[in-house]
Amino acid sequence: MTLQERVWQRRNRLRNRFPSLVASEAPAPAAAPRRKATLADVAERAGVSTSTASRALNGHGGLAAATRAAVQDAAAKLNFQPSALARSLRTQQTFTVGFVVPDVSSPFYAAALKGAQGRLEQAGYRVMLMDANLDVDRELAALETLLSHQVDGLLVASTGMPRSVFDGAVGTGATPAIFFDGVVEGTGQGAVTLDDEGGISLLVDHLVEHGHERIALLAGSQRESAGAARLRAFHAAMLDRGMSPADRYVKVCAWEIADGRRAGLELLADAEPATAVLASSAELALGFMSAAAVRGVRVPDEVALVAFDDPYFGDLLEPSLTAVAYDPRQVGATAADLLVEAMRSETEVREVRIPVTLVRRRSCGCQPEASR
Amino acid sequence: MTLQERVWQRRNRLRNRFPSLVASEAPAPAAAPRRKATLADVAERAGVSTSTASRALNGHGGLAAATRAAVQDAAAKLNFQPSALARSLRTQQTFTVGFVVPDVSSPFYAAALKGAQGRLEQAGYRVMLMDANLDVDRELAALETLLSHQVDGLLVASTGMPRSVFDGAVGTGATPAIFFDGVVEGTGQGAVTLDDEGGISLLVDHLVEHGHERIALLAGSQRESAGAARLRAFHAAMLDRGMSPADRYVKVCAWEIADGRRAGLELLADAEPATAVLASSAELALGFMSAAAVRGVRVPDEVALVAFDDPYFGDLLEPSLTAVAYDPRQVGATAADLLVEAMRSETEVREVRIPVTLVRRRSCGCQPEASR
DNA sequence: TTGTAAGCGTTATCAC
DNA sequence: GTGATAACGCTTACAA
């Protein structure tokens, strides 16, 4: 609070100087607007009341074509920009949505953000961004900040926040929330996730086609819903095909390259190592590749590798990476669409799954014809 | 406007229902706050005036310890969250900064955003994000939107906006602006850029050490200041070493992988092709690698490659990529620091350069001992 | 068709 | 120390 106090004092000092400036200084050289024009200024210049000015500018109720023109003219001359603050305070609508992610610098979230930003801007909304830094407490703080700014809606990829905490902070239904990627089960106005089951199925199927039976999983963190979903899907897919992976083949770990490397080294040190590895994310796959390189294990000759997540440089790796691909922007864009709908009118909660496809390259053992 | 109208109507309908709810419904089960608590509610519960309540909460001027406690207690009980909107309207401070980039989904900007976000949050600021989508017009629109929200400061990576346009929109000095990466020359309260000269020098030197003389440049777009700076630095560095590259070795192009590939193919089709290529960004280098692969030209045996920009998977490429590295978060963080300073008090304009280092890997022809 | 006035939720000035 | 009261810049009944 001390900080705020100091700053305000400064501002006020500045503002207090204005009267004298305006009063005693020579009249402005011309139409050089000394201070940001307000609606009252526009009204005065157009010779009407502020209410009329407001109506003219916002296209509301009946009003003479002439006055409307006069007001618009005055507004243009003064370069009038309505104060979003004042308007929002009055209308209780901010046309701002809060965007919360575990880590903006992750390519996936950055792309989702881009997708959402585009749609929201088109719909007339601004985005206020908060990075939870993979920390549930900060995620909570982020939500509270956003709420105190009266955002009209929330787009959140949760870092595994319990439902009760989320509902406690957001209050049920007051501010619509759409989850993407990191879902808080049982709340919110909707969710968009990747087709984890379908993707894992594609990957397992493909490895089986290559004749693998001892398949390992780099599962990622189980706090985020996506990690958990992929692990579940993996077990289901294996069972479907009459296999059940040894527990020691399933590595739960964080999402960074280093974590994938660590887990990969463990996998490779096994007495009877898996012949194929499925990584739950591109980073984990990268980590595994690096582990294999360190141990001198050749991919795909000695161990096959596939990933859920197709990095944009997947083609250029050695070996190129077989992976499940999807459009991360689409998840952001879709979530934004759902949110815009929810903000416009009550809608029933909807869950959307983004489709994924298999990209066959060399890390699985395939020999794709010379690409491109 | 039609949209806004409709939404407001709905809101008002909702609000109009509240009085009856509050008035006729049975008293709330307990301290279950029906509606978001306002300062007036807190004051009433504490039995003081709103002014006193405000003072108590903000730690202003003298007031009895007892009353202060009472107010704080009431606030806690009501779960009071001050309205940022109302406060900002009154104080003319939003504690929000606008962040404008050409493309958030680019790893560099995403990382810069992350760096800035952290520092700003620490300093008590929120970030409102706008993506200009590589378009100067949208950049302008973004600035105007931000200004209409009365952001306290601006962090902008410009897509090559002319100074006059920027000054016209932002007005000189009213709202402090710090540029990063994409600088608008001659305005703003500061700028932070990478050490383009130093980086290019390192790269050229290194290629020269390898014995190269016919060095080509994938220059990137010249609209952004970084692209232009690297091109200038390249010419300077070559001249310094007594070389002057043929014009046909210098390819100006956009920043995408595909652009790098296209330019790379041209370079390789040359009758007397360059023996080394310097790419102004990681994407351009990737594009070149892909072009070389298509043509069956081996890197580094037949052509050496170095890049300004070290992608996080640079190690795992084939060949691994020799590059100039830097911390993109640091540029965001540094810019944020400058901005916070500028918002707190008038400061002279400062230009900061972020240092870069050379990472020797295999694409240049080096044989680094087994990494890691 | 237009104006008057109330109010959104705060903070700040000035009396008491 | 504390309380009225007037802004901040806008929208919107309600009156004229």
Image (cartoon, coloured by chain):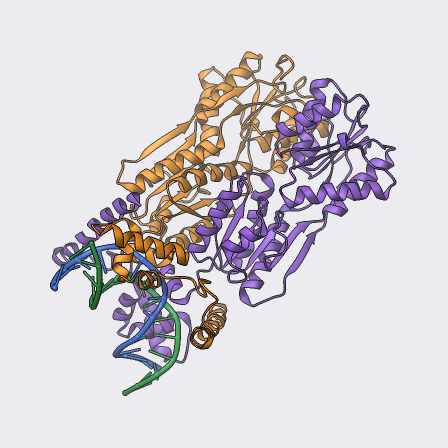
Chain colours: A purple, B orange, C blue, D green
Is residue B288 in view from this perspective? Answer: yes
Identify the residue at horizontal 62%, vertical 36% (top origin).
B257
Query: Exactly how many numbered labels are in the figure?
Result: 0
Q: Nearer the viewer, residue D6 or A71?
A: D6
Q: Position of residue A127 (x, y in %)?
A: 48, 52
The residue positioned 44% from the left and 58% from the top of the image is A150
Percent position (x, y) of residue A222? Answer: 65, 40
Quadrant, the C terminus of chain B: top right
Drawn side of residue B278 relative to residue A363, left or right: left
B32 on left or right of A334: left
Q: Is residue C5 left or right of residue D11?
A: left
Query: Measured along the vertical axis of the image, is residue A253 above or below residue B58?
Result: above
The foreground one among A252 and B44 is B44
| Residue A30 in the image: above or below residue B177 | below
Q: Is residue A269 above or below residue B116?
A: above
Seen from the viewer's position, the closer of residues A259 and D7 is A259
